[in-house]
Amino acid sequence: MKVGVFTVLFGKLSLEEMLDKVAKLGLGAVELGTGNYPGSPHLNVKKLLSNLQARTNLLAAIKSRGLAISGLSCHGNQVHPQKKIAKENHDIWRDTVRLAKMLNVDTVINFSGNPGSDVKSTMPNWVTCPWPGDYLEVVKYQWDKVLIPYWKEEAKFAKDHGVNIAFEMHPGFAVYNTETLLKIREACGKNVGANLDPSHLFWQGMDPLVVAKALGKAEAIFHVHAKDCRIDPQNTALNGVLDTKHYGDELNRSWIFRAVGYGHDEKWWCDFVSILRTVGYDGALSIEHEDSLMSGDEGLRKAIAVLNRAIIKEKAGQMHWA
């Protein structure tokens, strides 16, 4: 296993400056944004697609610092009900898959996206309850008419390019939990799986250890984010976990994202790493810093310290006791 970072954190730095900083921190992998919600601060995707020398230079810059690319990320909403937005997101997704093949990267991280409630919608609609019955009709339309047809075709496109699709299970999108991840995988193909981010599971009331075990058994974990979340027990007792207040309203929110170790202790992260090894995941733990209570540099340093102690680097020895 390697500790890595989602490099949009260093979006104000040039590619070379970012790579120098990541290497100096002792990290082993970079997750690079290619557009849509993360933006593409370090890559000119169009230039890389058309220029072999540019790709060669990029890979050399990464390799020379002892780093590897854990994945390319283009989190977006390709099934947005507004056709212009959907097409923009779709085009970036397809370019990202093409670039991944050229760079010998086998994982592209994305969201499933979320359609509207019907063909006349202009905004996405995330359904969180089954009643009144209109909501079940919305879910049926979204999955049967939009999501599955779209992602069946895109899973084939990705497979033809040797790429796995790693969906981040995120509320607000159709794939947000274990059940919906496995549902889209079953419908669209075995190269559809998860970018497992514990933070989004914690605040929904899931246990990421249980989720990791289930998805691991299904061989559906393609990438992992290292991001924590703290549930405020008083605010949650008062208002529940469905919280639309701004992320900056930390005092009143039911939950906020935290740096690794500030939502759950080091023992939890050791357990998480152990479950990942048990189910055969040996890729990167890509730190995604979204802690509004500390700077990016401090949050990253603290996360690295916890994860460096938690990860298992060596192969397991022989069971001399059994």
Image: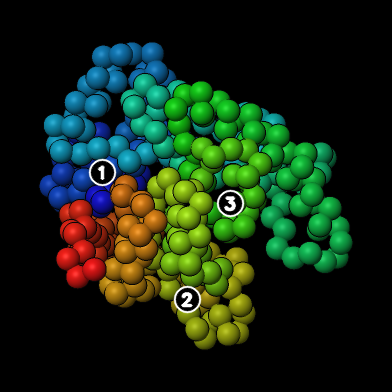
- Residue 176 visible to the viewer: yes
Where 64 falls versus 286 (above or below)? above
> For this rendering, which residue is in front, 36 or 165?
165
User: Which is nearer the N-term, disc 2 or disc 1?
Assistant: 1
Q: Which residue is mark 1?
A: 29
Residue 22 sits in which quadrant? top left
Residue 259 shows in this picture? no
Give the label on residue 231, or none.
Answer: 2
Residue at x 33% of width, y 25% of height: 103
Q: Alpha-carbon distance for marks 1 and 3? A: 25 Å
Q: Are marks 1 and 3 in contact (CB under 8 Å)?
A: no
Q: Is residue 269 above or below residue 23?
A: below
Which of 276/294 is in front? Answer: 276
Q: Which mark is residue 181?
A: 3
Q: Is residue 244 left or right of residue 136?
A: left
Residue at the image point whose x is 48% and y is 79% from the top: 232
